[in-house]
Amino acid sequence: MKDLFDRILANKGPLGKWASQAEGYFVFPKLEGPISNRMKFQGKDVITWSINDYLGLANLPEIKKVDGEAAAEYGSAYPMGARMMSGHTEFHEQLERECAAFVQKEASYLLNFGYQGFMSVIDALVTKDDIIVYDVDCHACIIDGVRLHMGKRFTFVHNNAESLEKNLERATKLAEQTGGGILVISEGVFGMRGEQGILKEIVALKEKFKFRLLVDDAHGFGTLGETGGGAGQEQGVQDGIDVYLATFAKSMASIGAFVAADQEIIDYLKYNLRSQMFAKSLPMVYVKGALKRLDMLRTQPELKAKLWENVNALQNGLKEKGFDIGTTTSCVTPVYLNGSIPEAMALVKDLRENHGIFCSIVVYPVIPKGLILLRLIPTATHTLQDVEETLAAFSAIRERLQNGTYKRLSAAVAAAMGE
């Protein structure tokens, strides 16, 4: 019999095998200083395009004041215990009412984390007789949530209504045999590519098929829609989303999340979400902080306006210079280049060391081999000067990638890794 660890020691995984070359620089980097458009990386000033602080709330004095006062009054422990037992307060209820109203739903329920919460929501909504149909490019939290499902599940081609319809036909036949129902899952915004989910097309299919729709809108909440109500509001189909989930970790620059739906569905989830029933309540410092942040989303539309001024400047500038940014329809700005993982390492090091640009790098297995994805997240704190410097830097690194400079620089790394 093998030792359980034999496999782990022999195969670190497609990302783990790069740990000795990548850790501390390309992965697990340490950004320092106040959260903003410019921070420090290894002692150098860099323009930061990898912070999900879309509306620039993280370091605002009025936000820090509320956070600090809440921490001083309640500490980090209060309330103690799970919501159902001893961790319930009027402020948790207030935040739930305000979140529900903001996304135009009857009710909502707080979650400690988006990832944990989404997995648990899926688990609570379906039984072994139900069928799940979900977009193949859904976030890892959805994939893990679907893995908990004891029944059948089908994937549809990313943002492809025809593929969804075919799978709904399969799911309908199966549901008629099992006596179950159908849950369709998509995202408001797909976080790597920046594309909005085809929510309008999905909702339209309700005229032909009987199903319920669950949407993860982590990147759409606060950034899309007339009032920031998310991708469903942006596409005019918020009413067609049966269960809506968003996180506080993006536009709200905090920790926590919420699920919103009709009152009866929320009442059911409150008593059946294992990740919340058996977990400590969201601490008061985050609840009071979220109330302040949500108030700013409601009352200061100029924050979203500034965000989109920067988004448009960056995305239009990249397109004008001939960069491939895919089909993004959100703030998420991917830049696609061709190259190997060692070339990607050399390229990113050049960006950070010589151009003072810090953005996230995405390579295989997250995207296909031979592609490099540089993922930029514009925020309301960025300036047009940041955009201009970044466009100039990207033009320079593209030229070095194309003329083979990075291939030569990365040859030793590639040889060591057997690439």
Image (tube, rainbow, N blue to C red):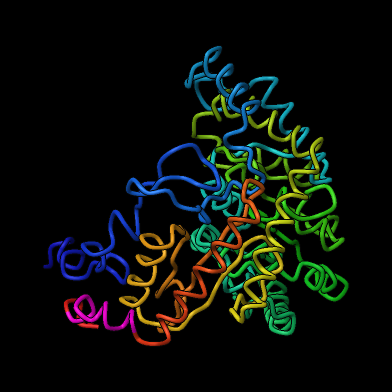
Picture coordinates of residue 65, whole percent (x, y): 61, 21
Magenta segment boundaries in residue numbering: 405-415
How far from the left and from the top, in percent, is residue 393?
49, 68
Q: Is residue 152 visible?
A: no
Q: How many marks?
A: 0
User: Magenta: predominant secondary structure element?
Assistant: helix
Instruction: Kindly identify the residue that appears in the image at 65 percent across and 20 percent down.
Output: 89
Which is more toward the observer, 245 or 184?
Answer: 245
Identify which residue is drawn at 30% across, 76% down: 342
* Residue 136 placement, left or right of 357: right
Q: Where, quadrant-wise, is the C terminus in this rendering?
A: bottom left
Q: Position of residue 37 (x, y in %)?
A: 55, 48
Q: Is residue 330 visible?
A: yes
Closer to us: 189 or 78: 189
Outermost residue, top side: 73
Quadrant where the N terminus sits is bottom left
- Residue at the far bottom in the pictured view: 403
